[in-house]
Amino acid sequence: MKSVYLDHQASTPLLPEAFEAMRPYFTEAFGSLSSLHRHGLRVRDGVKKAREQVAAFINAESPDDIIFTSGGTEAANLAVKGFADANERKGNHIVWCTTEHPSVMNSIEYLEKRHGFTSTRVPVNPIGQINPEDIRAAITDKTILVCVHLVNHDIGTIEPIKAISQITQEKGVVLYVDAVAAAGWLPIDVQALGCQLLSFSPHRFYGPKGVGVLYRNRKARITSQIHGGVQENGRRAGTENVPAIIGAGVACEIAARDLGDRIAHVSRLQKRLYDGMISRIKYIKLNGPVPGPDRVCCTLNWSTEFIEGEGQLLLFDLHGIAVASGSSCVSKSLKVSHVLSAIGLDHALAQGNIIMSLGKDNTGDDIDYVVEIFTKIVDKLRNMSPMWQEFQEHKIDSVISPTGHGQSFTERAASVSGKAAH
Amino acid sequence: MSDNEYTLYNETVMDHFMNPRNMGDLPEADGIGEVGAAACGDIMKISLKIRDGKIEDARFKTFGCGSAIASSSMATELIKGRTLEEVKNFSNQEVVDALGGLPPVKIHCSVLAEEALKAAIEDYEKKNSLESRTAPEAATA
């Protein structure tokens, strides 16, 4: 069976070059960075190089600005909670974008519940973009931190970080940028972006799991959230995951070297997939911006009307195609993705959600296969769907291309269940 | 990794999802039940053909996830041939057991199948009692 992996925003395969570079650090170069003998010093050398590779990848002022954590989630926790902890006496208000990743959102909500912080969620427009002027309006004299992601993890929207950093700099507030969905798929220059904190996760662009990166410059003081030794200059205790750090360095160096080609290739596939889906499937909607300057090159987030997302995901999987979904049936909480709610997407469309994220190894043939299989999946599931039938009978209407006949899907769903869905 | 080594649901659920039994409508259904799950937004419709107090045929249509489709497929299989009295005691647990189990978060899919079935029977009984009021001779025949 053909196998097509379209879930690169979940994780990517490790680069062979990174794997080779990591290998000796599992066996002969096993020392701890803190040790003063030759075993420790050898490892220290390797990690120093990795720190330089990572700093160069995002154009950090100094390798000392790079903190290695256990992953993107820990990096986000350290950015938000570590900064709040160190700057509490300056203020206790945080401004953030309503479509942030749960690692950011839940860190802020934790500070609100447990540490007396308050926050303002800034809404996004229907394609997921934040208006920088809304950030300005939300900043108060108690605000210490603004959190806005560079690229949305679900719908691929690129946020106007430079315009936001002009405002935060003007107001003397620190800007934290979650770049987990961006790193490896668009150029990142922390100095040009004007942020003081930025996090990303190497396994999202062919590096290993078990390592995350927090960039932190002199203007953003943070307090360690894991207490113990003085690893990472006292900003993150615990023996370093050396093999993963070495692999992260290599992934960053190769991403920096190949970024132009990678973006060009993946953008072409994105366009081909977009054109194929739009021309072959009726009653389908792209969530987030159309392919172009406002959208990251690797993802497409779809809502297909009258069918549910998990069923689509399962049928794709049975055809060897790996995709993701933000449908409530896929989540353990039975709630649709908060990003889809934040862009005001109708519940019926959120239920029919599928997320495809492309990578450097996908081919044009893969894309054509995916479109071909998807037309079959849509036919199969619509044939089974009472909503598709009721649409043909004009009992319910399409949200995407309304005919003016029948109830809305949401009204219909509420009338048969007696309650509105989440 | 072989093709079907890793699947989200067990073999029986996957089979009923991929090859659903009794999918579709009954042109002259005696009872139709359509219910939605408030929790997730899934919608299930079951149509029944009833003769001599027995379920002669059943069909379903489902807007929902794999386990919702499999639950409706299994429920329609289980109830065919049963009397209305028997079906009134039908519980979602029977669907779960026949499917060889569902993940805890998906149990509500089987509840939806039970509710759709009971709504279809209610619909049949409502129509039937109306008919018996308008045409008493038909009901006694």
Image: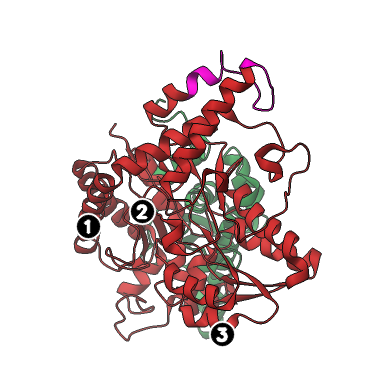
Chain colours: A red, B green
Q: What residue sits 33% from the left and 44% below the top?
A: A359
For the point 25% across and 53% down, the residue is A267
Relative depth, front residue between A27 and A383: A27
Q: Element at badge 1?
A: helix
Q: Is residue A411 visible?
A: yes
Which range is magenta?
Answer: A22-38
Are discs 1 and 3 both within one chain? Answer: yes
For the residues labelled 1 and 3, the Cα–Cα distance comes to: 37 Å
| Residue matched to label 3 | A137
- Sequence-wise, which precedes: disc 1 or disc 3? 3
**Residue type pointed to by label 2:** Pro
Badge number at residue A271: 1
Crowd around label 1: few <14 · some 14–19 · many ≥20 (10 Å)? some
- Nearer the observer: mark 1 or 2; the answer is 2
In the image, is residue A24 part of the stretch drawn in magenta?
Answer: yes
For marks 1 and 2 on the same chain, the one whose residue lies earlier in the sequence: 2
Magenta stretch: helix, strand or loop mostly: loop
Label drawn at residue A187: 2
The residue type indicated by label 1 comes to Lys
B124 lies left or right of A365: right
Residue A31 higher or lower than B12, as above or below: above
Residue under mark 3: which chain is it in?
A
Instruction: Give x and y (percent) for residue A212.
Output: 55, 43
Which one is nearer the viewer's eye here, B43 or A185?
A: A185
Q: How many marks?
A: 3
